[in-house]
Amino acid sequence: MRIAIIGTGYVGLVSGACFSDFGHEVVCVDKDAGKIEALERGIMPIFEPGLGQLVARNVEGRRLSFTTDLKRAVDGAEAVFIAVGTPSRRGDGHADLSYVYSAAGEIAEALTGPAVIVTKSTVPVGTGDEVERIIREAAPGVRTSVVSNPEFLREGAAIEDFKHPDRIVVGAEDDRAAEVMREIYRPLYLNRAPLLFTSRRTAELIKYAANAFLATKITFINEIADLCESLGADVQDVSRGIGLDRRIGSKFLHAGPGYGGSCFPKDTIALLKTAEDNQAPLRIVEAVVSVNDTRKRAMGRKVIRALGDEARGKTVALLGLTFKPNTDDMRDAPSISIVQALEDAGVNVRGYDPEGMEQARPLMPGVDLYDSPYEAAAGAHAVVLVTEWDVLRALDLRRLAATMAEPVLVDLRNIYPPDEVRAAGLAWHGVGRPQLESA
Ligand SMILES: NC(=O)c1ccc[n+]([C@@H]2O[C@H](COP(=O)([O-])OP(=O)(O)OC[C@H]3O[C@@H](n4cnc5c(N)ncnc54)[C@H](O)[C@@H]3O)[C@@H](O)[C@H]2O)c1
C-alpha cells in the first residue's frame, strides 16, 4: 500500500520506518528541510535504538523515502498519516492543534484520489471531526475518510513497541476506512496484536485516558515514597508487594523524580482542559498534575539537604539529563527543574548524559557539561543520579568517591543498593527508602 506520513519526528519517523519494513511503500514528509536532508544522507535526527539500521534497510529496499514536498508524497497515497506535534498551547494548556489543522489543509489541497486520512498525533476528542470538515471543504470531490489511530510507542523502545504493540486502536466511522487500516496493520494483526475498532471520538479519548492513568500510577507511587520516608518504610518493597498483584501490575511503580517527557505533562493538562470544557472535571488527574509539578523541584530541595548545612558555592554533578533513558528527548525532563532549584540556591551544577547533551545545552545554559560521569563528578560535593541509563547502572563507586570533594550520592532512581554505596565510601540518599546512618 502507498502511505504518506506528514511529520517526521519520533512518531512519524518510527511509524514510517516500521510500515515500510512491513512491505508498504512509504514517503515521510517534513517541513524541516534540515531534517529531510540529514535523513537522505542516512543521518537520524533523533536518537532511537535500532532506527538507523531500520531506515537504511528500507531506503535501500526502495520502500522508504523522504521529502519536503507534501504534494508529491500525498499524490496517489491510499493512506495519509498526520504525525505532527501537538504541544501545549501557550497560556492555557489546551493542545495546540495548529500543526494538525494546517497539515489537514495541505493534504486536502494535494489529494487527487480517494484516501484515508489517519490522525496519529495525540489530539483532543473532536479533532477528527474538524480535520474531516477541513478536508471535505477543501477537497469536496474526493472520497476521503478520517480515522483516529493514536500511537502508544515509548521513546527508547519505539521500534519494539511499534512492531509488538499491546493493542492497535482504530477509530473509524466507515467500513472502507476500517478495511484500509486492517490492511496496513495486517503484519501485526497476523502476530495477534489486538486491533481494537472504536468510534473516532472514543479512540481519541483512549490515548488521553491511557496516558493519564500511567501518569497517575507514577504519581501514586511517588507519594507513597514520600510517606515511606516519613515512616521508615521501603517503597521498593511496597512496589513489589503491590505490583505482584496482577490486578495492579508492576509497571510504572518505580518511585523517582516525577514524570516528564514529550507526552505525559502536556497530555494530562490537555485532558483536564477537555474535561473542564465538558463540565466533567477529572479531580484525580488534577491532583496528579499538581503533585508531579511540585515534585520535580522538591527533588532539587532533596539534593540541597544532602549537601548539608551550606549549599551555596558547592558543586553538584547530575548524571542522566534526559527524561528517561535511551532517548535524547529533553522535553519537560525533571533534570530541568532540579537544575533550576540548585542554581537558585547558589549551587554550581555540572551534567553528563550519554545522548542528550546537545539537546540539554540550550535548556540549562549555566550547567557545565562533561564527557563522562567521572569527569563530571571529580571535585563535586554530591553526585545525583537523575536518569537510569544503562551506563550509569554500573558505575565504579569507589573511583567516583575517590575524586569527589565530598562523597555523597543522591540516587533518585534507586539504582544502587544503599549498602553498596556506603561500602564504597559514599553517603547515600535515595527515594522512599529508610535513610540509615551513613557509613
Ligand atoms: N514522542 C512520543 O513518544 C509520542 C508517543 C505517542 C504519541 N505521540 C504524539 O505524536 C505526535 C508527534 O509527536 P513527536 O514527538 O513525533 O513530535 P516531533 O515534534 O518530534 O515531530 C513533529 C514533526 O512534524 C513536523 N511538522 C509539523 N507540521 C508539519 C507539516 N505541516 N508538514 C510537514 N511536517 C510538519 C515538524 O517539523 C516535526 O519534525 C504528538 O501529537 C505526540 O503527542 C508522541
Image (cartoon, rainbow, N blue to C red):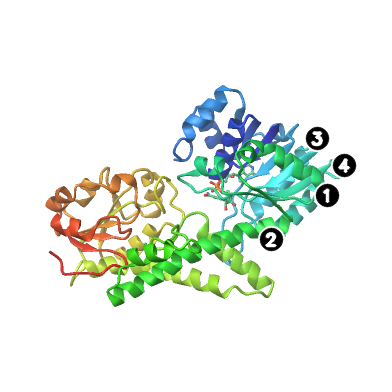
Q: What residue do we see at 70% from left, 59% from top? A: 202
- Tell me the number on the disc at residue 107: none
Residue at which label 1 appears: 137
Please, what secondary structure does the residue beneath circle 4 have? loop
Q: Amino acid at mark 1?
A: Glu
Is the residue indicated by label 1 positioned so its CB lies within 8 Å of ligand 1? Answer: no
Q: Quadrant of the N terminus?
A: top right
Q: Name the residue furthest front.
A: 245
Circle 4 crowding by C-alpha within 10 Å: few under 14, some 14–19, many from 20: few
Q: Earlier in the sequence, mark 2 or mark 4?
A: 2
Residue at which label 3 appears: 112
Q: Is residue 345 visible?
A: no
Q: Name the residue furthest right.
A: 141
Q: Amino acid at mark 3?
A: Thr
Circle 1 crowding by C-alpha within 10 Å: few under 14, some 14–19, many from 20: few
Q: Nearer the viewer, residue 401 or 390?
A: 390
Q: Name the residue furthest bottom.
A: 231
